[in-house]
Amino acid sequence: MNSFALRRYEFSITAAAALLAGCGGSQPPVGVPAGVGAHRVETASSSSFRVLHRFGTSPNDGLRPDASLIDVNGTLYGTTVHGGAYNNEGTVFSISAAGVERVLHSFGSSHDGTQPYASLIDVNGTLYGTTASGGAAGKGTVFSVTTAGVEHVLHSFGSGSDGETPLASLINVNGMLYGTTDWGSTSDGTVFRVSTGGSERVLCDFAGGYSGGEPRAALIAVKGTLYGTTALGGLYGDSYGGDGTLFSVNATHGLVILHDFGKGDDGIAPVASLIDVKGTLYGTTLTGPVNFRGNGTVFSISADGTERVLHSFGSDDGSRPEAGLIDVKGTLYGTTAFGGAYGYGTVFSISTDGAEHVLHSFGRLRDGADGRQPAAGVIYVDGTLYGTTYAGGDHRRSDTGGTAFALRI
């Protein structure tokens, strides 16, 4: 099994101009886990849910969307890990709010990248993303693609001490693109930056162990500092090599481990990106609490590294959140890849004090026609949440390719 398949089967602001000249050594962790916050679970109506598109129902269509959608001037754009015109290596697609889908680019031609697990970002009308494999060295790429479908590989990973296997989306900070790789030829992952012209530089190598390893989530930038998570490593854990960390990187302090997951009531394996809400970071863990290796958590962490578990999932209200959260008018929204009323995942909301509501449980329609395994997060556009599911969509097919959906809130 490829390492990036672990995302699913074994367990995604303004910055200062002088951001990140490079990384220093690992720093001692600060902050300790707080107790589990009080929470309530309620189930909301699914009457406002609709499927926009079922993948794989036309020739050369994409299959298995693993990434969140983005909105560019009223059109949604995304990626699929598989499908397309070349050897089932993935696509970039667009979809209208009415559900009209178009494949813009099929990966797998020549030294093109393959298997895009990450969301796209929009920089001045051009879309940028990563592929987990493919490229000149077969270790993944950074690419650009126009909204008309013209694709260009900016950087191929895997040469020398470069990183390998980028699973996460990029972020744009003052015209430079920042991201992470899950592996490196001499490390357990990297933080890198690349210009829109393709000049790439590794800023930070993770050594595994106490310093963290395998960063699978997108970074965020807050006031000149990057924040992110590693799926493994840290002070606590078992034979997998630690239960994960939350880190920061900036030019002054280099790499600092702010929190080590896996102690007490804490979660395990953060594989999703963080969000910043009024100076507090919020995120999810794939499993945990550690005391009973549970169904995952939602947590908050303050600037000094003090962490609090806001909600521990209990299967009926969702299980294994692989994606990050979004903030809509002070309420957080997210997805779980499994659990819920039918076992195939949920869309949920949660307040910053831990009150959780299930908005939709997947599997409600016959044989998962509404989708299964929403591995990606949701986005908010004009009163509606839009997202994707990795599987399901067409009960007549054994190789169902996932869905794009809309949920009015």
Image (spheres, rainbow, N blue to C red):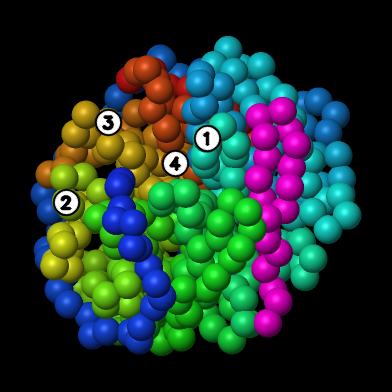
* 173 sits to left or right of 74: left
Question: Is 346 within the magenta?
Answer: no
Q: Quadrant of residue 76?
A: top right
Task: Please state which amino acid type lies under the numbered disc 2.
Answer: Gly
- 233 versus 349 height, above or below: below
Q: Residue 297 in the image: state x and y as whole percent.
A: 30, 55
| Other residues around mark 2 within 10 Å, as few (<14) / some (14–19) / many (≥20) | few
Q: Which residue is mark 1?
A: 124
Q: Which residue is mark 4?
A: 377
Between disc 4 and disc 2, the foreground one is: 2
Between disc 1 and disc 2, the foreground one is: 1
89 or 360: which is nearer to us?
A: 89
| Other residues around mark 3 within 10 Å, as few (<14) / some (14–19) / many (≥20) | few
Q: Which residues are magenta?
A: 140-160
Question: Is 151 within the magenta?
Answer: yes
Question: Residue drawn at (78%, 47%), measured in percent from left and top?
Answer: 107
Give the distance between the C-alpha atoms of the residues marked 3 and 2, in whole angstroms. 16 Å
Q: Which residue is mark 2?
A: 279
Q: Residue 129 in the image: state x and y as whole percent.
A: 60, 48
Q: Quadrant of residue 23?
A: bottom left
N-term-proximal mark, 3 vs 1: 1
* 42 sits to left or right of 61: left
Helix, strand or loop for disc 1: loop
Quadrant that contains the C terminus: top left
Q: Which residue is mark 3?
A: 328
